[in-house]
Image (cartoon, rainbow, N blue to C red):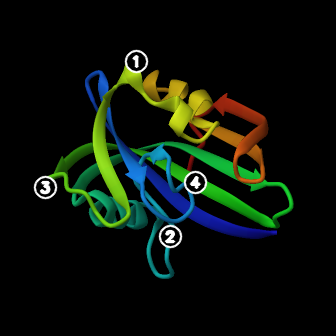
């Protein structure tokens, strides 16, 4: 099995969250946090910061790691390990990029019907301030068919 390591950054301010509408690539047409693949020579946190800057023009001055999720897709020999961060402090002006169109949402108005199925599960841990690990299996990249999630402080 081939392991691919990625990042995901979420910006929460009070009772709202900044999401990006994915305009191309994996997840196109869905709302998501900001992130992507870790490239050779960078740490996972460096990748999270780079992706945030590339996708929404923000510099992450401080991040807090909240979770690690392993994603499996049927009929695919890849494991996607995603490290999830909350952006604690940032600078810059939010701007749309070629890949993402950012928009603030009230937490009770998150468009889950236009997001990955797993988001309905693990966002609850994030909003409750709980650190977590999870495993999600998808059929054809679209339909979640099984999952496990648990609270833990072991996310490094």
Q: Dot 3: within a 10 Å radius of its alpha carbon, few (fewer than 14), some, or many (20 or more) residues? A: few
- Residue 17 vertical position relative to residue 128 in the rendered view, above or below: below
Q: Which mark is residue 42?
A: none
Between the residue at mark 3 and the residue at mark 1, the CA separation in whole angstroms equals 26 Å
Q: Are marks 4 and 1 in contact (CB under 8 Å)?
A: no
Q: Are marks 1 and 2 in contact (CB under 8 Å)?
A: no
Q: Which badge, 4 or 1, is on the more N-terminal residue? A: 4
Q: Classify 126 as above or below 32.
A: above
- Give percent across and percent down for residue 40: 51, 81
Disc on the earlier residue, 3 or 4: 4
Question: Disc 3 or 2, which lies upstream in sequence?
Answer: 2
Q: CA distance from mark 4 to mark 1?
A: 25 Å
Residue 82 shows which numbered tag?
4
Position of residue 137 measured from the top left corner of the image (x, y, whole percent): 77, 45
Image-quadrant location for residue 75: bottom right
Instruction: Give the numbered dot on residue 38.
Output: 2
Residue drawn at point x = 44 percent, y = 25 percent: 127
Q: Circle 3 — which element?
A: loop
Front-most of 81 and 139? 139
Label 1, residues with CA under 10 Å away: few <14, some 14-19, many ≥20: few
Q: Farthest residue to the right: give it.
A: 75
Residue marked by disc 3: 92
Residue mark closest to the camera, 3 vs 2: 3
SS at mark 4 in the image:
strand
- Is 49 situated above or below 71? below
Report the residue marked by disc 1: 108
Q: Earlier in the sequence, mark 1 or mark 2?
A: 2
Given this view, does label 1 or label 2 mark the residue nearer the observer?
1
């Amino acid at each position: 099995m081939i392991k691919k390591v990625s990042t995901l950054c979420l910006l929460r301010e009070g009772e709202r969250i900044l999401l990006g509408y994915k305009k191309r690539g994996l997840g196109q047409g869905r709302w998501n946090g900001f992130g992507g693949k870790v490239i050779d020579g960078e740490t996972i946190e460096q990748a999270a910061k780079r992706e945030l800057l590339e996708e929404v023009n923000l510099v992450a001055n401080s991040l807090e790691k909240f979770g690690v999720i392993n994603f499996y897709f049927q009929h695919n020999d890849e494991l996607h390990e995603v490290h999830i961060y909350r952006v604690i402090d940032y600078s810059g002006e939010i701007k749309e990029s070629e890949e993402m169109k950012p928009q603030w949402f009230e937490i009770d108005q998150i468009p889950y019907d236009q997001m990955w199925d797993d988001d309905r599960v693990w966002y609850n841990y994030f909003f409750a301030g709980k650190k977590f690990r999870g495993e999600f299996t998808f059929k054809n990249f679209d339909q979640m068919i099984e999952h496990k999630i648990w609270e833990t402080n072991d996310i490094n």
